[in-house]
């Protein structure tokens, strides 16, 4: 989640013990401060399963080594990459996808049709889908999340938005903003000169916006919870919003993950439990789209639907359930523009940061992990009922029903939430109607639902997790999985709701999120693992699934921190200090080895004073050769800063071509970048000499000699 649109309110009043407290009991402060993380967790569990799995062949294996010199911190309006590398801008916001997109400078460029036919705003998670095997590293469909809008940048030629804070928004402005959100699909190719470009007018180019009609599938589809005036049967909805992290499937579809969607709605009347738990506003939505309702040009309640205040006798006659059609994983077929996207409700309803595929094995269930990106929220796992059949794997260039395969694996299964124990063990708690809560009641009964109401459990995923005693975390964001070992890494970005040492852990009803706040651990005292009030630096944890399907073992992989500070338990130096880890990707290089890429969305001043947001790299397997499995003071050379973004930006979204010669990242909300505000393809490392209208964009990083990235 971009810090530009963080919701700082606390919505979890469960009283469940937070991860910080668990870690405090796992690791003593004295141990941390005496010897750094090496004494704390190297290795808490001895995990680092890739090394163990390949121990027999370790002598013959050539270790993967990062071969670039770490770049220094930077405060410039440019992307900084290592010597011997180049970086170029690709598909910035406003890039025309079809002939219906007007010129960037025309008055129409700020209209709804332009935004619906151009690359959307504020790039985030993304993935590439090859169009054929032979050219998979040179030509593919780029699926790209457009997380949110910056109204000032969007309406800069007009001096800013109209009635942004109060009063009725003009219908055309609301439509334009609605169409700037969502997902972009665009064909990109590598040209003979080594640079990349998009293909205007490609049949694969399209936009899915906050107005695009979509289907509902899984437990919530067709239930009473999803009935609206638009879809009385509860099987359709309109739009996807605030898609941050992403996922992809082995059968060739894209997963866009709805994160900060609650803030596009407003409920000024009766408060439903799930409205309050998820933080739906009570006075005005983030952008005020609902205030355009009643405009003479409004069609099909396109604006009225954002006001979910109950106004009729039945749900099918108003939009009280509109928000219940949001908060899901959205599956998109990038190869077939005729198919509607499908919201897969079985994977839970919350602020999904992403959707990450677990280790894939024939005959075993398909597993996906997701974090709820908010302070003191939870980590989830979905396990399919259907075992994986390799015959369902993606076949680029072939025409078949990928969404039908998605229904097979994603509409039926079990959703779990994680509980972490101080001894380094963990448990996955099933969220099913019949699951028994710690106080001895079936979960459905504890939620006040009918005994078999799985749809109700899904709609109330967060309350269900509260009741089961899940562990509140410090904003779980992106995850990634080592495909060889199956070990899962996840970023815990930060938690500004942490009290000082000696403070009692209490819940504060910040922003009127709930009607009856409880007393518990919604704010937590500092501890050995998080020795700072207002944990701004964050950390990354790792776990390994155990033989029993509901057990796992965990450890801290690295703590964020500033070089030279006492609160730097991982011993980070000037060349690799970071804070607020966000994006994460395991770049599999084969032979049980890979590069773990770490991206940041930093708001922690001691690090921000040194550098802009950045991209770092580490080879987890290389740590094993030094007698450790985590980052500590003795292996700092293994964690290297690879790139730094321009001023004001967040570095996010990441993947590489199959041949690993091109690495794609996204630069979100830059302050004054790219250098040429009009060019669609340009050098990303050049800082402009004038003020420009900033444009989020994808950046392609390559070696000047065409070799593999990082090594």
Image (spheres, helix red, strand yellow):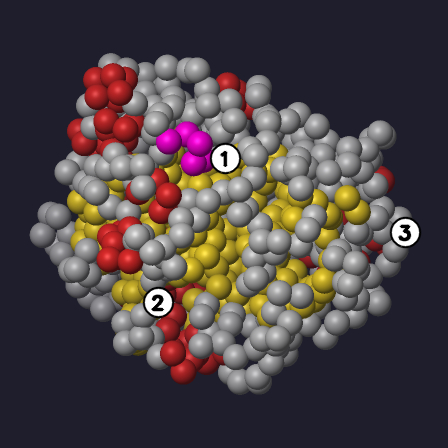
The 10 Å Cα crowd at callout 1, few under 14, some 14 to 19, many 20 or more, is many
Instruction: Give the answer, above or below, for where 134 lies relative to 669.
Output: below
Q: Is residue 251 magenta?
A: no
- Return the x and y of residue 459 as percentages of the image width and height: 36, 58
> In terms of sequence position, does the residue under pointer 1 or pointer 3 come before the other?
3
Q: CA distance from mark 2 to mark 1?
A: 29 Å
Q: CA distance from mark 2 to mark 3?
A: 49 Å
| Residue found at x 33% / y 56% | 60
| Residue found at x 44% / y 41% | 618
Residue 310 in view here:
no
Q: Nearer the viewer, residue 577 or 71?
A: 71
- Return the x and y of residue 455 as percentages of the image width and height: 33, 65
Q: Secondary structure at mark 2?
A: loop
User: Which residue matches tag 3?
Assistant: 106
Q: Is residue 591 left or right of residue 143?
A: left
- Return the x and y of residue 471 as percentages of the image width and height: 26, 41
**Residue 640, numbered label:** 1
> In terms of sequence position, does the residue under pointer 2 or pointer 3 come before the other?
3
Residue farthest to the right, as pictured: 106
Pair 2/3: label in front: 2
- Marks 1/3 in contact by CB < 8 Å: the verdict is no
């Amino acid at each position: 989640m971009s810090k530009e649109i963080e919701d700082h309110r606390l919505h979890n009043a469960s009283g469940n013990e937070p991860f910080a407290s668990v870690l405090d009991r796992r690791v003593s402060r004295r141990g941390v401060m005496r010897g750094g993380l090496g004494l704390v967790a190297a290795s808490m569990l001895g995990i680092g399963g890739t090394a163990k799995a390949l121990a027999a062949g370790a002598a013959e294996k050539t270790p993967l080594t990062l071969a670039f010199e770490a770049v220094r911190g930077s405060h410039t309006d440019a992307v900084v990459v290592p010597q011997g590398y180049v970086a170029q801008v690709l598909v910035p916001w406003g890039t025309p996808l079809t002939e219906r997109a007007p010129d960037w400078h025309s008055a129409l460029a700020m209209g709804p049709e332009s935004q619906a036919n151009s690359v959307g705003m504020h790039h985030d998670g993304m993935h590439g889908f090859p169009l054929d095997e032979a050219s998979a590293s040179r030509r593919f469909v780029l699926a790209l999340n457009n997380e949110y809008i910056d109204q000032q940048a969007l309406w800069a030629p007009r001096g800013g938005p109209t009635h942004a804070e109060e009063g009725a928004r003009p219908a055309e402005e609301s439509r334009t903003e609605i169409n700037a959100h969502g997902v972009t699909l665009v064909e990109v190719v590598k040209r003979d000169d080594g640079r990349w470009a998009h293909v205007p007018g490609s049949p694969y180019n399209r936009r899915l916006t906050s107005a695009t009609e979509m289907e509902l599938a899984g437990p919530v589809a067709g239930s009473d919870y999803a009935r609206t005036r638009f879809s009385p049967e509860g099987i359709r909805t309109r739009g996807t919003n605030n898609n941050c992290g992403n996922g992809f499937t082995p059968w060739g579809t894209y997963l866009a993950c709805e994160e900060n969607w609650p803030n596009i709605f407003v409920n000024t009347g009766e408060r439903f439990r799930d409205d309050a738990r998820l933080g739906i506003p009570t006075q005005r939505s983030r952008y005020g789209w609902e205030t355009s309702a009643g405009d003479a040009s409004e069609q099909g309640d396109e604006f009225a639907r954002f006001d979910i205040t109950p106004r009729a006798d039945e749900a099918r006659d108003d939009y009280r359930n509109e928000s219940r059609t949001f908060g899901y994983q959205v599956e998109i077929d990038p190869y077939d523009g005729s198919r509607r996207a499908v919201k897969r409700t079985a994977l839970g309803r919350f602020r999904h940061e992403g959707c990450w595929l677990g280790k894939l094995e024939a005959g075993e269930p398909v597993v996906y992990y997701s974090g709820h990106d908010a302070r003191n929220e939870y980590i989830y796992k979905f396990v399919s009922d259907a075992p994986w059949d390799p015959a369902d794997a993606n076949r680029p260039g072939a025409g078949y029903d990928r969404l039908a395969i998605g229904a097979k694996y994603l509409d039926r299964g079990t959703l779990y939430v994680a509980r972490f124990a101080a001894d380094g063990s963990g448990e996955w708690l099933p969220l099913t109607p019949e699951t028994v809560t710690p106080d001895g009641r079936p979960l459905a009964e504890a939620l006040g639902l009918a005994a078999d109401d799985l749809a109700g459990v899904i709609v109330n995923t967060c309350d269900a997790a509260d009741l089961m005693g899940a562990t509140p975390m410090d904003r779980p964001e992106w995850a990634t999985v080592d495909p060889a070992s199956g070990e899962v890494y996840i970023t815990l970005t930060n938690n500004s709701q942490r009290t000082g040492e000696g403070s009692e852990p209490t819940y504060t009803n910040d922003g009127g999120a709930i009607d009856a706040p409880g007393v518990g651990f919604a704010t937590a005292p500092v501890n050995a693992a998080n020795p700072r009030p207002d944990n701004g630096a964050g950390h990354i944890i790792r776990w390994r699934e155990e033989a029993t399907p509901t057990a796992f073992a965990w450890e801290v992989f690295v703590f964020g921190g500033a070089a030279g500070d006492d609160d730097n338990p991982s011993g980070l130096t000037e060349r690799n200090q970071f804070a607020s880890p966000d994006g994460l990707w395991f770049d599999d290089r084969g032979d049980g080895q890979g590069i773990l890429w770490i991206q940041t969305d930093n708001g922690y001043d001691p690090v921000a004073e040194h550098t802009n947001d950045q991209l770092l790299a580490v080879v987890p397997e290389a740590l094993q050769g030094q007698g450790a499995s985590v980052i500590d003071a003795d292996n700092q050379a293994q964690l290297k800063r690879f790139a730094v973004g321009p001023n004001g930006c967040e570095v996010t979204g990441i993947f590489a071509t199959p041949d690993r010669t091109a690495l794609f990242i996204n630069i979100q909300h830059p302050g004054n970048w790219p250098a040429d505000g009009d060019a669609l393809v340009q050098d990303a490392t050049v800082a402009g000499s004038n003020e420009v209208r900033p444009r989020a964009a994808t950046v392609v990083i390559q070696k000047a000699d065409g070799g593999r990235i990082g090594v």
